[in-house]
Every structure is written in C-alpha cells, then in structure tokens.
Amino acid sequence: MITIIQKPTDSVGDNSTRMVAEELTKTGVPYQFIDIDAIDPLSGTCSGELIWVCGIRQDEHQFEVINALSVDNQVINSPESIFTCASKVKTSALLQKMGIKTPETLFTASVEIAARFIEKHRLVVYKPVYGYDGNGICLISSVGELGKGPYYLQEYVPNKQDYRIFVINGKSVGAIVRRSDSLAHNIHQCGIGIPCEIDMDMDTIAGEAAMAVGVDYGGVDLLNDKEGYTVLEVNGTPNWHCMSAPIPKLLAAYLVTKKSQSRC
Ligand SMILES: Nc1ncnc2c1ncn2[C@@H]1O[C@H](COP(=O)(O)OP(=O)(O)O)[C@@H](O)[C@H]1O
Ligand SMILES: [Mg+2]
C-alpha cells in the first residue's frame, strides 16, 4: 500500500495528487490517502508504509507531522529534503559546497554587509528566505530600498526567461522555459511555460542540484548567464505545470519501484 498526502493547494481544475493517483490505479498498486491534519503521528497507527508527500502547507504542524512519520515510514521526498528546499539559505549553502553554479548570494542581518553587496553588484534580487511561487521577490538597487532584515540577496542575472526542470532520481525528465513581463517568471506570477528540450548541460546541473539537496524528485529552477546554466533553487514538492513530459506517469512508476524495493 502506498500512502498519499494530498497537496493542500489542489483544486478541481489543478489536482496534482489526483493525476498521480490515477496513474497508480493503472499500475494496480493499492494506495490510500491520509489527512495529516486529522492524525496523531505519535499514536503508532501509521508505520511501515511508503508515504508520498505530494505537498504540505509550510507550517509548523504539517512539517512536524511528516517529520515524525518519517521515523517509522519511508517518506518521499524525505522531510529533511523538503525542509532544505523550503529554505533558500540552506539550499544556497549546499549548492556552494557541492560546487554547483549558482548566482552569488548573501544572507545577513547586517545592513552594512547588505549595503556592500548591493554596491558591488549594483542590482540585486531580494527573496524571502522561505518564499515560493515568486512571492515577495524584488529588485533592489540601493540600501534604502531594503525593509527589515535578515536579507537574502542575490546578484541579478540579466535574462529574458528561466527554466524549470523536473528531475526524478537524478535524471531530468521534463523541462519548460518560462517567460513573463516581470522579474519572476513563475507560472503563479503570470509567467507562460513552454515545453523545451533538455540539453546535456541542463540535465547535468539539474540532476546535481537535486542530488545536492537530497530529493528523490524535484523541480529545479535555472537561469542562463553568459557562461551557462546557474541554479536558483530546487522545489521539494514541485508542480509540473505546462510540461509535455508524462510526469504523473513517471512519478507513479518511481513510487511503485521504491515501494517494491522497500521492506514496507
Ligand atoms: N538572481 C536572479 N536574477 C534574475 N532573476 C531571478 C533571480 N533569482 C530569481 N529570479 C527570478 O525569480 C523567480 C523566482 O525565484 P526563485 O529563486 O525560484 O524563488 P521562488 O521560490 O519564489 O520560486 C525565478 O524563477 C526567476 O525568474
Ligand atoms: Mg522558483
């Protein structure tokens, strides 16, 4: 039995969880849903399962429930990797440590240090540390534009588009190019996604980024600068909006394989 935690943002017209569940049905592997707001993970009633987290709310309760469940169950993606992806700071630290190309980034509570970084780069991107969907991202060109710290600032990489690569088990299986009239090309910021080819460099860097943050599967955001691809972040509970690759089928097949390999 595969146990599924439904993505809280699923809607009738955009239901990621159902798309994968329908593919699981075709495989004949049984599955069930759990509502993590309606269980006690300490009760011991859920153990020895393979649990697929399609999505969670970024709040203390849901984080802690999957964390506790992972003690006695195999949770995909692992809570550690979902937390890592949620934190832009931890993600940057891991990308840097693994030597994976990423824009120059600063994290500080010091206005003075932030000011020096802005002076050096002239144009920087401010991002909320636990931000998502392009929310709260803005361009900063002077220290006076900064609000309250701490500051996660990144050199601005001039671009007309970005890329979202869907990676499963270290392999890039789908990609889109996203374009918009704003700084953040996210679909949730009215970006338009168009399926694109996965070239070798894209495949390599996206796979490496996913491995660096420890996800089984993830959505890797890339920009292209003069020297090639550079990684912005990895999403641990990604969507596959606008992708032409059969992501739900591939994800279901991956879960079935993991289930058959597990002792659950
Ligand atoms: N350093 C940067 N230079 C230029 N554009 C950026 C930079 N960082 C982010 N962006 C734009 O903002 C979008 C959202 O940034 P990202 O780091 O992926 O955060 P989020 O979690 O909000 O999606 C990116 O997909 C890209 O279009
Ligand atoms: Mg992103």
Image (cartoon, rainbow, N blue to C red):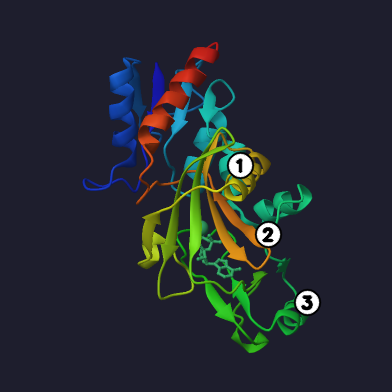
Q: Earlier in the sequence, mark 3 or mark 1?
A: 3
Cα gap from disc 2 to disc 3, whole angstroms: 20 Å
Sequence order check, earlier mark of 2 and 3: 2
> What amino acid is labelled 3 in the image?
Ile
Distance from label 3 to label 1 (Cα)? 33 Å
x and y, in percent, of residue 244 in the image: 35, 45
Q: Secondary structure at mark 3?
A: helix
Task: From the image, tell me which residue sits under label 1.
Answer: 207
Q: Label 3, on which residue?
A: 113
Label 1 and label 2: CA atoms lie apart by 14 Å
Residue 214 quadrant: top right
Q: Which residue is mark 2?
A: 102
Q: Is residue 54 above or below residue 209?
A: above
Residue 62: % across, % down: 47, 41
Q: Is residue 69 visible?
A: no
Disc 3 versus disc 1: nearer the observer: 1
* Three-letter amino acid code of the residue under disc 2: Thr
Asked if labels 1 and 3 touch by Cβ distance under 8 angstroms, the answer is no
